[in-house]
Amino acid sequence: DAGVIQSPRHEVTEMGQEVTLRCKPISGHDYLFWYRQTMMRGLELLIYFNNNVPIDDSGMPEDRFSAKMPNASFSTLKIQPSEPRDSAVYFCASSWQGPANEKLFFGSGTQLSVL
Amino acid sequence: EDKVVQSPLSLVVHEGDTVTLNCSYEVTNFRSLLWYKQEKKAPTFLFMLTSSGIEKKSGRLSSILDKKELSSILNITATQTGDSAIYLCAVGNYNTNAGKSTFGDGTTLTVKP
């Protein structure tokens, strides 16, 4: 399996622009998570899905952030409009439904820089 | 709110040294504690500890869960430069869906030749 695939690897944009991050989870995994990592706040859970349904979005910073999972193999995280404080590494992770499903498989992340 | 605290925040050692990383937690209805290694980018899974499996070992790495003290340690013996990474501790509880773990801030380990 190719693992969790994220794109793009790097994104540089200007304040006010729309940013879309993409994720393909591991085939057969039922959970998908979006995390954000910064030096100041560490690894924060933004939102997670189970069987394509958003379960908990309490970590989404504000209305500028939105996430979708239209099918089992694809999810997007959108920031509109972007701000410099959104600069961070955004990780997508997936896990299965069965035992030990706390174990997360992370993608390589998207390094976002908002100028 | 669940809380995970790791110590030290950073550590510098020389090859061949033994290191111990600490993780303490406050979690309602503890389910599991996981250790991840983060080199360059994506965290990768090391160990998962639960009430039924409080000690794990893989090569030079080992981890123990102390449910009484609400803590865990990660030991690395005979360290190598390739062990340089951020080590993350995460804790899950039964009150939330699996996978919604709370992460600590990590310990940055630097191993010098």
Image (spheres, coloured by chain):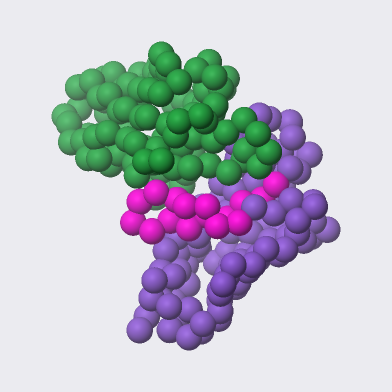
Chain colours: A green, B purple
Residue furthest out toward the front: A1
Q: Which residues are magenta?
A: B32-47
Residue A58, position in %: x, y? 54, 24
Residue A50 in which image quadrant: top right
Residue A92, position in %: x, y? 41, 35
* Residue A42 appears in view: yes
Above or below, comparing residue A75 to residue A9 in the picture: above
In the rendered structure, does residue B38 fall within the stretch colored magenta?
A: yes
Residue B63 in which image quadrant: bottom right
Residue A81, position in %: x, y? 26, 20
> Where's the C terminus of chain B, which quadrant?
bottom left
Please give the name of the residue rendered at 73% of the width and 31% of the height, measured from the top-left corner: B95
The dominant secondary structure in magenta is strand
Please give the name of the residue rendered at 63% of the width and 59% of the height, measured from the top-left corner: B23
Front-lying residue, A9 or A28: A28
Please give the name of the residue rendered at 49% of the width and 35% of the height, measured from the top-left corner: A94
Residue A69 in which image quadrant: top left
Above or below, comparing residue B91 to residue A13 in the picture: below
Residue A9, position in %: x, y? 25, 40
Please give the name of the residue rendered at 28% of the width and 18% of the height, measured from the top-left corner: A80
Determine whether, in the image, residue B94 is placed left or right of residue B73: right
How many callouts does the rendering have? Answer: 0
> Where's the N terminus of chain B, which quadrant?
top right
Above or below, comparing residue B32 to residue A82 in the picture: below
Front-lying residue, A81 or B102: B102
* Residue B4 appears in view: no
Determine whether, in the image, residue A101 is placed left or right of residue A70: right
